[in-house]
Image: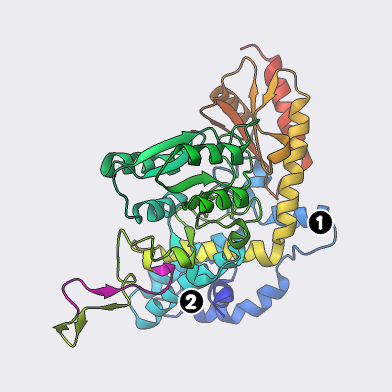
Amino acid sequence: MAQSLWYRYYRTDVIPPFEYRQPFEGVANCVRQETARLYLERRDMRVSSDVEKVAAIRHELPPVQQYVYLNTGSNGPLPKASYIALQNQALREWQEGRTRAQQIAQVVEMQEAARIAFAGVLGCAPDEVALTHSTTEGINIALMGLNWQPGDEVISATTEHSGGLYPLFLLEQRYGVALRMTQIGVAGLDPVAALQHALQAGRRTRAVILSHVSWSTGRVLPVAELARVAHEAGALFICDAAQSCGMVPSDVEALGADVYACAGQKWLCGPQGAGAVYVRRERMGEIQQTFIGTTGIETNGFVEGQLIGGPGAFVPPAGAKRYEALTLHPSSVLAMTASLEWLTSQVGWEWIYRRIQELGKYCYQELRKVPGVTIHTPAEAMAGLVHFHLEGIVPAKLTERLEQRDVLIRDVGDPAVNRVSTGFYNTREDIDHLIDAILAIKREPC
């Protein structure tokens, strides 16, 4: 029931601006009447030909029709289903208000639908998922929830994103935690051996935090092996999944991660400010609540106005919902669910993962042919991110000049390179266009 909530309430054509119905007419009623018809009429992605399927997908994503859109690693394109969910929920709130009991109950149902949708992608139970606003929020939930003591150690890598590194700096300043930094993620370095060496050099490693896919090199790390090594040393394995969830299979049970923090707006094509974090059930007692809100307490110390069990006594909910302390935007939650259900039921995850990797390898091969290009992503451990440097052109300048030709990639620092993200909606022609644009730029005077 919850998995089809956005269909039941909100799947309809966009209601045009300035054609508002009278307040309290009930937008949901007309939406429900149209749902069955529109479901049958909507463009079906499950067609036999990849060419037809890609064309149907691109029809749902306007930006990829306007640009050579190769920057999903920053923000993925928003599908039509998600946009409609955003607009219709906002219209409902404007017309009907936000305080009726039924509306409040629907918000709770929306959130549960989102947890179920994320759990389907992650291969876990819905009560092991907490909704967040970003990957960084999920990482902070995990790191700040541990009972750190001076001299405890945490292992990470210099290749990690600032959203994962900066919370570690706070741990060092606030609790006296020792940071042990590695080069895991760099091409040519054995990540498992590097982690084993760092663990052996330490004495009190409490946690290891690494990405599943490195944002700065594009390398896909062997998370299952890394998590096993961390667990053998008695440490938690916390995974930054910003660049992996939606790009590569993210079965958290198979990966063995204790925490897996996801972004909604990248490879999952959701709205900004939506995400989730998986927390393994067995670790919830160890990862305490740092912030707490109205859903963070199952029972408290008051019974019929009498304090029982001492001041501040409370019992948290059984699942990861305990970590949801900040208000979630209903429109964004609903739109995130719409994106996940579109990807799951209409596009298909096996096809998505396969196509992203195939296009990534094609991009890698074609970039290698360009004189002056150095690739920083290891071919043997890559999926949809390709990092490269073009001799003689500063990466930021190349990004700018490509955008002038309607080719969207990005540049990253340390190392300073350009990064291509091959989405499932891209085509080989997109990559050929990128190569042609780079060659044209090379011919131009600096």
Judge whether 109 appears above or below 163 on screen.
below
Q: Residue at x 53, y 65 (%)?
A: 85
Q: Residue at x 71, y 32 (%)?
A: 434
Q: Residue at x 78, y 38 (%)?
A: 362
Q: Position of residue 66 (x, y in %)?
A: 65, 43
Judge by depth and name the residue closer to the eye, 77 or 191: 191
Residue 137 makes an appearance in the image: yes
Q: Report the side of 404 relative to 348 (left or right).
A: left
Q: Residues within 10 Å of mark 2 (few under 14, many from 20)?
A: many
Q: Report the side of 345 relative to 12 (left or right).
A: right
Residue that badge 1 annotates: 52
Res 32 quadrant in image: bottom right
Mark 2 to mark 1 CA distance (whole Å):
34 Å
SS category of the residue bearing label 2: helix
Residue span colored magenta: 309-321
Q: Residue at x 66, y 46 (%)?
A: 64
Judge whether 107 appears above or below 274 on screen.
below
Is residue 385 highlighted in magenta?
no
Q: Position of residue 22 (x, y in %)?
A: 42, 76
Q: Report the side of 31 relative to 284 (left or right).
A: right
Q: Position of residue 285 (x, y in %)?
A: 38, 66
Q: Which mark is residue 27?
A: 2
Judge by depth and name the residue closer to the eye, 345 or 154: 154
Q: Decide whether the magenta segment is chiefly helix, strand or loop.
A: loop
